[in-house]
Image: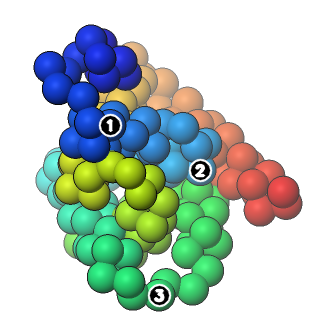
Amino acid sequence: MILSPSLALAHSGAHSAGFIHGLEHPISGLDHLLAMLAVGLWAVQRGGRALWAVPLAFIGMMSLGGLLGLTGWNLPQFELGILSSVLILGVVVALAVRLPVWQTAVVVGTLAVFHGFAHTVETPHAVSALTYNVGFLLSTAALHLGGIGLGVALAKIGQTQWLRLAGGAIALVGIGLFLQ
């Protein structure tokens, strides 16, 4: 129902279309999807406060990047930043990098600015920017939760090496995206 605006929402138009487009955007591109999942996986590897601090840092800084895009600010090579985020996040998960939580949050927050900027500058013109941004923030949070859920499930059954393998796979896809 969420993906079908005429069924899920009582009113059609720019607001509902903006929300639906925003929900779809992070899951419609492999680069965004994998980076968001990797944030959740890395948060699980860090554990403790990182389970909430790392995804919140990403969402907060992604919002800042979105605001920069709305104001017309120029962020050169933002697509390169997004591709880099897939590779970097894949590598840190594959290597199970253990930075202090605040440094982990700084890394994901910095990368998140590129995602937020891209989401906002790619907002369809015929939709509400506000509802579009709410949609992509919720979708991003859901992807983080998906990564956290997968990571917690693997950790509970003692399969943490699969987390690292997932990180390696994400990094390899990141390399492939660079080569395209």
Marked residue nearer the N-terminal end (1 or 3): 1
In screen coordinates, is 54 left or right of 121? left
Q: Report the amino acid beneath label 2.
A: Asp
Say what secondary structure mark 2 lies in. Answer: helix
Nearest-to-viewer mark from 1 and 3:
1
**Residue 3, quarter of the rendered image:** top left
Label 1 with label 3: CB-CB less than 8 Å: no
Please tell me which residue lies in front, 28 or 126: 126
Question: What crowding class fits label 3: few (fewer than 14 Cα within 10 Å), some (14-19), or many (20 or more)?
Answer: few
Which one is nearer the viewer's eye here, 145 or 167? 145
Cα separation between marks 2 and 1: 23 Å
User: Disc 3 to disc 2, how far (Cα)?
Assistant: 21 Å
Three-letter code, disc 1: Ala
Tell me which corner region of the image, top left, top right, bottom left or bottom right, holds residue 125. Answer: bottom left
> Mark number for residue 74?
3
Q: Residue at 61% across / 80% down in the picture? A: 77
In the picture, the quarter occupied by the C terminus is bottom right
**Residue at label 1?**
17
Q: Position of residue 45 (x, y in %)?
A: 37, 46
Can the viewer see residue 41 in this picture?
A: no
Q: Residue at x 39, y 63 (%)?
A: 120
- Please state which of residues 61 and 159 is positioned toward the viewer in this rendering: 61
The amino acid type, in three-letter code, at marker 3 is Asn
Name the colouring of the figure: rainbow
Q: Nearer the viewer, mark 2 or mark 1?
A: 1
Q: Is residue 102 visible?
A: yes
Q: Tell me residue 149's x, y (percent).
A: 32, 27
Q: Residues within 10 Å of mark 2 (few under 14, many from 20)?
A: many
Which residue bears the numbered disc 2? 31
